[in-house]
Image (spheres, helix red, strand yellow):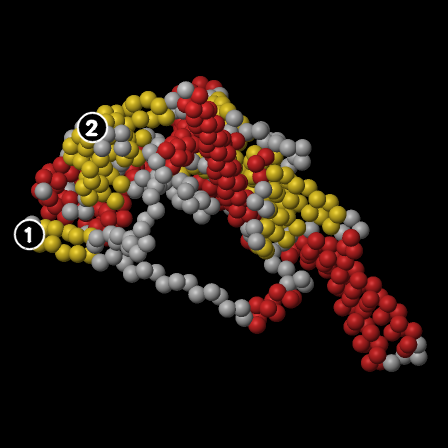
Amino acid sequence: MTEETADKLRQIELFSRLETGDLRRLAALFERAEYRQDDCLTQHGETSTCLHLLESGRATAWRMDAGGVEEPVRDLGPGDSFGVAALFLNDASNVTVQITENATVLSLERSRLDQYLDDFPQVRDGLLLPAAIEERLSTPQFDWLTADEYVVFFSTKSRWALVAAEVTPLLIFLVVTAVASLTRHILYLPVILTASAVLVGGGLALIKWQDWRNDYYVVTNKRVVHHESRLPTLRVTVKQAPLHQVQNVNMLKSGPIAKSFNFGTLYIQTAGVEGSIAFRYLDDPEQCQQLIFDLLEKTRSLEKAIERVAIRRAMEQRLEPQELPEEGTEAETAPPIQYTSGEAVWDIESPPAEPREQPERQSILAGIGRRIGFFLPRFREERGRVVTWHKHPFVLAKAIWIPALILVAALLAGVAWATIGGQSFSSVVLVLFFIWCLSLFWLLWRYEDWRNDVFQMTDSHIIDIDRLPLGLRESKRQAALEQVQNVNAEIPNVWARLFNYGSVVIETAGAAGDLTFEWVMRPRAVQAEIFQRIEALRAKQRTEEAERRRTEMADWFSVYDEMKEGSDSQE
């Protein structure tokens, strides 16, 4: 049976280059299962981790569009396979595969393949991955990606953008060298001018190249991102918008050169105040434009499919309630993975269970830290589901340096006067003490004013709070997370880059307008955290909406059953 399975695996493109021995060992990892007509192997919207191979029977793959209409895309028969992407990617399936004739299916689980490749690493080089999967696996990874987020498109600016940027340094070099050649009769001047041309032109050319290299565009399955870095100020701007907020994508090619070399600008329009995120000097902009439209369509159809699956399960639970397991029965454990080669068989034990995490013990230092936290707050605090950010300590230093200087000067003057001892000792000490008290009050006022200016995020809102000490005034601006259109981060200069602070601008569609978090630590991390909360809120809303619709459907069925029973009793 292993020989037959190995021959079938050779027909799959992924395994077509493997040696016979490798195919035999791989065939032993497949599990055989019987399916009846109308059973589903995969559901649109669910994440699958299996490669399936039909040994017998037939199946049909269905795809659902954004309107909820299903259409067949492929008929499957004996020897056909599907699900190669499920072995390497964590995407939700975009098709439903339904058995149309009683079938026997061989399935390979991703975890088994991963363990096999770990044990036989030479096999990994023999796999022939489809180009789309190879491209996905080779895309850059970023620390701001969420757990179920992946990069679909990554690009820097076109090479023609670099050519256009290098025109100015080239002109400077040519002009200065031309002047040097005209002044060759003047002692040392040609050498000085030529050296200046090389240094200035070359340095500017290097800066332009670095600017071009640091600007890139990213499209993921959840957002669009434009990262821009500028030399020599090291100003960094990161603009991003959730994919579901994209309203339109327009493409512009200006002039015959752009049309001839196929580069242009994409304007990704959202409902935010700035209106759009621009992908400038982009190679083959039509491809990126179509990709974004396809992602939007896929996202809408995926949400529709998830809703349909939830409704189907609710109906199945209502019509065919599952029996509870009998007491005393034990859950079946998965058999160990076996590798075979000819007549030899050996087992690979499953990894030991991870040890339970022990609760952290509260230390005395932690308790002391909480008590002094009022005076020394962390720049990011999380209590429950509320995250609070304080402004950078530079803001505090700028606010208190004058009163602190006066405070220290008054104290030193008092000590010096007490050491010298004058005739008007008591009056001078009183004056210095009065100045010292005023400066201390001023310093505490400024400190409390800094401490009270915070930015907060809950599960549903973004809040900007500005309070004066002693409760004299309080200003609070907030916006619902579901109204957030764009979230942009900016690191303005070299010092901000060095000490990692900047601003986060939250564009909303509500009456609150923009909310700007200024002087925050790690602005790109703050930006990523806000986006994660937005996605979590959307997932929660989708779940609640699906639950509401399931409840409504259950009510409809209940009323239908009551009406049917009433009509039957009358008969």
Q: If you read the primary sequence from the N terminus, does the residue marked by circle 1 or circle 2 appear first?
A: 2
Q: Residues within 10 Å of mark 1 (few under 14, many from 20)?
A: few
Q: Which mark is residue 517?
A: none
Rendered position, 129 above or below 570: below
Secondary structure, mark 1, is: loop
What type is the residue that disc 2 sits on?
Glu
Camera-nearest residue between 559 and 149: 559
- The x and y percentages for residue 516 are 64, 42
Residue 549 appears anywhere in the view:
no
The residue drawn where x is 17% and y is 30% is 57
Quadrant in the rendering for residue 296: top left
Q: Is residue 103 left or right of residue 309?
A: left
Secondary structure, mark 2, is: strand
Rendered position, 182 above or below 525: above
Rendered position, 468 above or below 170: below
Q: Which mark is residue 343?
A: 1
Residue located beneath label 2 in the image: 101
What type is the residue that disc 1 sits on?
Glu
- The x and y percentages for residue 103 are 19, 33
- The x and y percentages for residue 223 are 47, 36
